[in-house]
Amino acid sequence: MKTTNRLFASILVCIIIFAMIPATPVYASPTSIRVTVNGRMVHFPDQQPVMVNNRLLVPVGGVFDDMGFLVQWEVVGPRIASLTRGDVSIIIPADAENFLINGVVFQPEVPQQIINNRLMLPLRAISDAIGGTSNWDPVNRIAIITVPEDDTPTPISTPIPTPTPAAFSIDRDFNWYLTQMDSGEDEFINCGPAVATMATLWYFQYIDFTIEDARNSIPERLNQWWFHRDIASVLYDAGVSFDWTDAFTLYDALVWLREGRIMTALIDATDITFRLDETRIGRFYSYDYDGILGHFIIIRGYYIVDGNLYFVVYDPWTIGYYCADGWPLGRGRLFCAFEVTYSIMGWGQGWVIIVNNPGQPPTQTGQLWP
């Protein structure tokens, strides 16, 4: 009997002790956010979508592939994602609060950001860029995205009208392209003087200035290869307004082009894919040695071909290279924008010279050749 009383007393004490412990609330894990694209559920293998200030951010991988975008990354410099689909090109730098849609700056309500080492993008803004629709089911926490299935997305509405969304080429109403050919005894190393001369002609228009004039303006550099400082010296002496930077990015280049500014850039031409055909895409000259092929070019626009982003360049190395119609292959050449960026950030050490718009609006057109 005493044993039973002691057992009962022990149980009673335990009940009293547990009753005195404050209750800890248990929260049910919230339902994860799901995304469907044209009725198909999107799988997120690691980083899940998140809601930030009532705006849905999703990781680059997965959903945008399902929306038909080609996703690429800039391999050197700041992290930049490039999304292309049909005639829509979106450049998204991870460390900015805006991005570019067809070269026009777009400011989302909630900017892109890095979460758990993943670049997260505002889903609605990207969907709208290709004429899609987005709806939110708050009960089931599902973002429902519908986008055109074909390759001709609905024209987008951007903050600034873009009459030629797939191209932006800065030009003049006269020919300011020059070739190194027959430019004096240094013709084979005259890419620097040629680029400096072209930039000067573009800035002033119709000025009497030649490649030989540029070369001879720096006597101590005769018979020698040029550097950025030599080009800058010619531009400065001629009165050309310019800036320069050693932190080139693809994003900045597109902004400068939209502002009507051209760039001189130093690349390793071997970084540019060789392609000698009538498409006018890629490097058109070959080389028979191993090593770096340092070369100056002018960047004067961008173009989108088959979903790939290209810079429109003036390459002065047109020594015997012409199309069947007599058009120099280096005039309005298309170099892969990512290859050019990689080369500038590598061999060019990030340096470019940005020639400012002289107040005379340049011709902005999608036409590259006659």
Image (cartoon, rainbow, N blue to C red):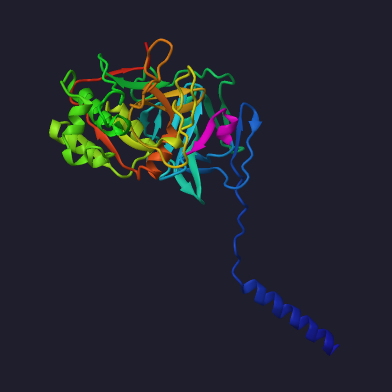
Q: Which residues are magenta?
A: 63-73
Instruction: Please provide percent x and percent y for residue 75.
Output: 47, 42
Residue 43: quadrant of the picture: top right
**32 or 280, which is in the foreground?**
280
Left or right relative to 251: residue 87? right
- Residue at 17% x, 33% y is 216
- Residue at 79% x, 86% y is 6
In magenta stretch: residue 68: yes
8 above or below 202? below
Left or right relative to 198: residue 327? right
Left or right relative to 154: residue 234? left
Q: Quadrant of the C terminus?
A: top left
61 above or below 309? below
Instruction: Please provide percent x and percent y for residue 44.
Output: 61, 42
Q: Can the viewer see residue 111 in this picture?
A: no
Outermost right residue:
1
Q: Quadrant of the N terminus?
A: bottom right
Instruction: Please provide percent x and percent y for residue 268.
Output: 40, 38
**167 or 290, which is in the foreground?**
290
210 above or below 142? above
In magenta stretch: residue 94: no
193 above or below 19? above
